[in-house]
Image (spheres, rainbow, N blue to C red):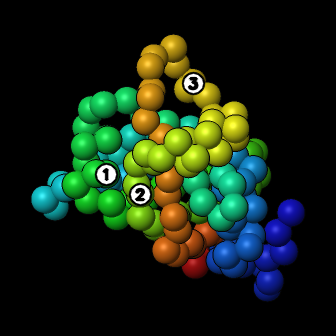
């Protein structure tokens, strides 16, 4: 899938490669921070038009991203002989207009667990970084 030059087991991905991986998965971890205290939440999401969308219920996650909209979302994939990790830095905001809500509801974003998650959050990326890893034994010194 990815071409590693010179046998290097770690490949830094460009934005296009990283975004393609984000679009191909639906789960990650959302990192928020308030007053210097980070918190992390497993989330499922969808991507559309260069942004990510997730659903949430009232609680810590919603309160924290409302206070400090600067967030990280990390997604990864692990196979038997390779793995990848992408970190998206962005600004989160709760969607509140009927037009925004109608558009994101059309993306088919469903909650994984049978709980009410009535708030839709949009994450607009400010930066993206990704790495692809080829597994193997530690080399000799």
Which residue carries the number 1 mark? 65
Q: How many marks?
A: 3
- Earlier residue among tags 1 and 2: 1
Q: CA distance from mark 2 to mark 3?
A: 21 Å
Q: Tell me, yes or no, whether the two marked residues, 1 and 2, touch with CB atoms within 8 Å.
A: yes
Which marked residue is nearer to the observer: mark 2 or mark 3?
2
Residue at left 79%, top 76%?
4
In the image, taking residue 109 as reference, residue 23 lies left or right, namely right
Q: CA distance from mark 1 to mark 3?
A: 20 Å
In the image, taking residue 63 as reference, residue 88 lies left or right, namely right
With respect to residue 89, does 35 lie above or below? above
Residue at left 64%, top 45%?
103
In the image, taking residue 72 as reference, residue 102 lies left or right, namely right
Residue 134 place in picture, x, y as percent: 73, 63
Q: CA distance from mark 1 to mark 2?
A: 7 Å
- Earlier residue among tags 1 and 3: 1
Which residue carries the number 2 mark? 92
**Secondary structure beneath disc 1?**
helix
Choose top left, top right, bottom left or bottom right for residue 28: top right
In the image, taking residue 126 as reference, residue 67 lies left or right, namely left
From this viewpoint, is residue 108 visible?
yes
Which residue carries the number 3 mark? 112
With respect to residue 95, does 19 lie above or below? below
Q: Residue furthest bottom?
A: 6
* Quarter that holds the N terminus: bottom right
């Amino acid at each position: 899938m990815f071409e590693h030059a010179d046998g290097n087991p770690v490949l830094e991905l460009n934005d296009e490669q990283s975004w393609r991986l984000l679009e191909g998965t639906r789960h990650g971890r959302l990192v928020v921070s308030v007053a210097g205290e980070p918190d992390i939440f497993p989330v499922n999401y969808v991507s559309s038009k260069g942004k990510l969308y997730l659903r949430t219920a009232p609680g810590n996650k919603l309160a924290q991203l409302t206070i400090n909209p600067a967030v990280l979302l990390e997604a990864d994939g692990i196979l038997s002989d390779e793995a990848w990790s992408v970190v998206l830095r962005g600004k989160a905001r709760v969607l509140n207009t009927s037009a925004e809500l109608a558009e994101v509801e059309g993306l088919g974003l469903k909650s994984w667990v049978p709980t009410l998650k009535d708030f839709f959050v949009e994450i607009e990326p400010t930066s993206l970084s990704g790495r692809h890893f080829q597994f193997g034994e530690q080399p000799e010194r």
